[in-house]
Image (spheres, grey):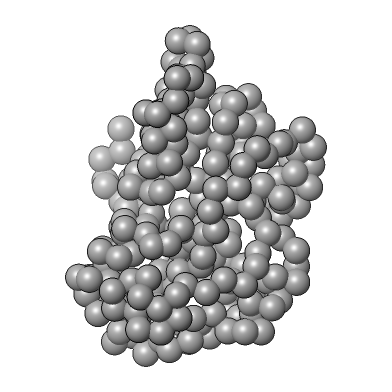
């Protein structure tokens, strides 16, 4: 048992407990002739979707709390689960053995049987942080998600597309809920999250504190879409969130 309570150590312990819990529940599901469904973090839309499937289908499925899409794909490849949710870019990179999956080689037996909904990149910034465009994120404290989440990987690519180097001392690796608390407490300047819209967590945060939805820049959008890695231009329409006056 670690007794000094260092935040970094506590974060590692929490990550490992979440991973171990998912594996245990997956094995239990198999023993009961059910299907473990690798979903995502607590309060996330992936988990809510997987839970809805479990509640409304005759086939017994068990929604698993995980760190996100990258971990889900790895659990699928290792045979720990038969079903998983992941962003399109992560699934493509796993299939081709690129990006964060380079060392594992192509996952050529990976198959998809449904595309659920687009997941726009949300860049949320404190209204007093001086962030008008995505390029203004340079030098700011940005919450990008946790290792094992597909959102974190995409957030880093978005920063790179804007010419921003992800400096470790500025990147904050915490789940979305904790990141939004960090915005409220001014411990972070901005949050990048890839999530279906309108997202309840984003809507609640916008209602509670002065935040700005920051647009990506056209050149960065074009570069990301041209990479043919599962990205395409998407507009969050005006009014999708109560405080959002423009698309």
- List x then y, in percent, for residue 41: 40, 45
Up-down relation of residue 114 to residue 109 (above or below): below
Q: Visible in this render: residue 204?
A: yes
Up-down relation of residue 96 to residue 194 (above or below): above
Specify the quadrant that holds the N terminus. Answer: top left
Specify the quadrant that holds the C terminus. Answer: bottom left
Comparing 126 with 196, the one in front is 196
- List x then y, in percent, for residue 201: 31, 59
Name the residue rendered at 72%, 51% in the picture: 93
- List x then y, in percent, for residue 205: 27, 67
- The answer to which quarter of the image holds residue 163 is bottom right
Up-down relation of residue 121 to residue 105 (above or below): below
Name the residue rendered at 64%, 52% in the picture: 88
Total marks shown come to: 0
- Residue 86 relative to residue 42: left or right: right
Comparing 125 with 54, the one in front is 54
Q: Visible in this render: residue 190?
A: no
- The answer to which quarter of the image holds residue 106 is top right
Up-down relation of residue 226 to residue 218 (above or below): above
Name the residue rendered at 40%, 78% in the picture: 238
Name the residue rendered at 60%, 81% in the picture: 162
């Amino acid at each position: 048992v670690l007794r000094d309570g260092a935040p970094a150590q506590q974060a590692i312990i929490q990550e490992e407990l979440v991973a171990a819990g998912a594996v245990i529940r997956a094995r239990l599901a198999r023993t009961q002739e059910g299907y473990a469904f690798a979903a995502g973090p607590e309060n996330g839309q992936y988990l809510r979707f997987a839970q809805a499937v479990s509640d409304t289908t005759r086939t017994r499925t068990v929604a698993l709390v995980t760190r996100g899409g990258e971990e889900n794909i790895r659990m699928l490849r290792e045979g720990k689960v038969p079903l998983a949710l992941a962003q399109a870019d992560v699934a493509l990179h796993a299939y081709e053995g690129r990006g964060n999956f380079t060392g594992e080689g192509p996952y050529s037996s990976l198959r998809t049987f449904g595309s659920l909904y687009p997941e726009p990149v949300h860049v949320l910034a404190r209204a007093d942080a001086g962030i008008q465009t995505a390029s203004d994120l340079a030098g700011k404290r940005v919450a990008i998600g946790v290792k094992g989440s597909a959102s974190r990987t995409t957030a880093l690519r978005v920063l790179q597309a804007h010419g921003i180097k992800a400096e470790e001392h500025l990147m904050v690796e915490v789940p979305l809920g904790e990141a939004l608390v960090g915005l409220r407490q001014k411990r972070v300047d901005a949050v990048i999250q890839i999530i279906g819209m309108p997202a309840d967590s984003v809507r609640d945060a916008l209602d509670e504190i002065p935040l700005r939805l920051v647009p990506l820049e056209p050149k960065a959008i074009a570069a990301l879409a041209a990479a043919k890695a599962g990205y395409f231009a998407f507009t969050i329409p005006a009014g999708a969130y109560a405080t959002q006056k423009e698309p």
